[in-house]
Amino acid sequence: MKSNRGVTLTSLVIYIIGLVIVIALMSNFSGYFYKNLSEVTIKQNADEQYSKFLSYITKDANADNLTFVKSGLEGKDCIVFVFSDGTEHQYIRQNQNIYFINTESGKEKKLILCENISVSTSDAFYYTDKKLDINFNISNSKFSTVLNVKMWNKQKKG
């Protein structure tokens, strides 16, 4: 008959050494990936930046609950959209960047939509007669768009 006494000291040492080797390999691999993670930078080209900006601003210009639009508030080069629910979206050109600011219930969120902006005229945004003119350069690439802004006056009938 064979005697079963459980785990021997030799097999326990072999299991522990194997486990230490596996843990050391996993920590080396994860350390390598985390170290390289900080070196990854994503740069968008001018067309990608303008497409991102245009997707934000056309969504606001075509919104069903848009109640107020104004450009150039407080001497800033900006466009402001106010919605019926009290939400306010601002697009501001400042420090060679275009920022999107979403103000909702007193909380403000700020995103950079475009970088390395230059303007050949005095303003990048000009709103008049329900038309929004957008003219600016991103990294020496000229972008210009005219958007029709629809203000929706939803009133209850009689």
Image: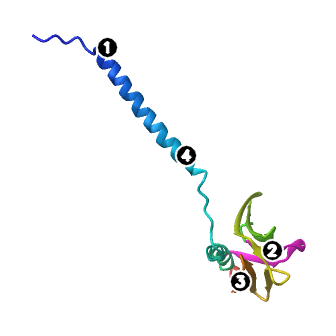
Q: Nearer the viewer, residue 58 or 151?
A: 58
- The residue shown at (78%, 80%) is 125
Q: Quadrant of the C terminus?
A: bottom right
Query: Which circle's residue, 3 or 1, is located before the other in the chain?
Result: 1
Residue lying at the far bottom in this picture: please name it. 129
Q: Which mark is on residue 128?
A: none
Per the model, the C-alpha gap separating discs 4 and 3 is: 38 Å
- Residue topped by disc 4: 34
- Residue topped by disc 1: 9
Q: Tell me which amino acid carries mark 2.
A: Cys
Query: Which circle's residue, 2 or 3, is located before the other in the chain?
Result: 2
Magenta part of the protein: which range? 65-83
Whether residue 107 can be seen here:
yes
Residue 54 percent location from the top left of the image:
65, 77
In the picture provided, is 25 more to the left or to the right than 108? left
Does residue 71 show up magenta in the picture? Answer: yes
- The residue shown at (19%, 12%) is 4
Q: Tell me which amino acid carries mark 4.
A: Tyr
Residue 103 percent location from the top left of the image:
75, 62
Judged from the image, the secondary structure of the residue bearing numbered disc 2 is strand
